[in-house]
Amino acid sequence: AAVCVLLAFFLIEWTRRSGPPATSKFLNDVLGPFRDARDSGELIFTPIALLLGLSLPVWNFCYSWSQDGTVPPQAWSGVITIALGDSVAALVVRRWGHLWFHWPGTHRTLIGSGASFISQILLWIGLAAFYGWPWRAGLLPLALGVLAEAYTEQIDNLAIPLLVMSLLPSS
């Protein structure tokens, strides 16, 4: 399913840039609100990076699932960091971000990073209990992912899951 969505993103983006003028204008108007500072070039890459950040860890470890039916910890890195951590951080910052300090030299807040880390750790502990992984093994990779997120400005939705994936131990 993720491959189909990724292909749809590429087709929509190609049509937006190279399609008939009326269609390109319509797509620019519809997709405009979803652009952020990282999409300042011709390509709207944020949704593609988000989908890849969620999917690449799963795709990378798909083969090992078919062998014994267990899911390796690394496959969860996109779900933990982006689907949960990034979302919780955004919600908390939207409500309370103005009350807290920023990381030095960035626009990221300490409360957002803290909320992200706590939510990730809670999910990790639940997954570790369910799959029988050592729960302490996720603390450092997730903490480093949150720190990297605080200082990463480009394509963080892709880079952070891959970083955490590479740091998590195998089951």
Image: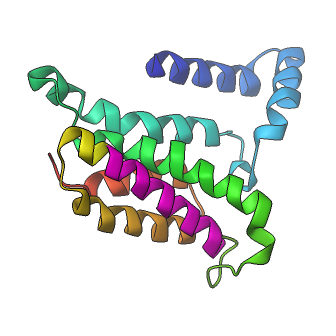
Where on the picture, by quarter, is residue 164?
bottom left
Identify the residue at the far left of this view: 68
Predominant secondary structure, magenta span: helix
Residue placed at 68% from the left, 54% from the top?
A: 90
Residue placed at 68% from the left, 39% from the top?
A: 44
Where on the picture, by quarter, is residue 67?
top left
Residue placed at 90% from the left, 16% from the top?
A: 22
Which part of the image, by quadrant, shows the C terminus? top left
Where on the picture, by quarter, is residue 160?
bottom left
Rendering coords of residue 28 (x, y %): 83, 30
Q: Is residue 98 left or right of residue 11?
A: right
Q: Is residue 119 magenta?
A: yes
Q: Is residue 43 left or right of residue 70?
A: right
Residue placed at 33% from the left, 52% from the top?
A: 125
Q: Is residue 153 left or right of residue 143?
A: right
Q: Nearer the viewer, residue 88 or 13?
A: 88
Describe the colour scheme in one phrase.
rainbow
Q: Is residue 122 above or below residue 64?
A: below
Identify the residue at the far bottom of this view: 104
Q: Is residue 41 above or below residue 93?
A: above
Q: Nearer the viewer, residue 16 or 71?
A: 71
The magenta stretch is 109-126
Q: Nearer the viewer, residue 124 or 51?
A: 124
Rendering coords of residue 119 (x, y %): 50, 55
Rendering coords of residue 92 (x, y %): 69, 59
Q: Is residue 87 above or below residue 27?
A: below
Q: Is residue 170 magenta?
A: no
Q: How many marks?
A: 0
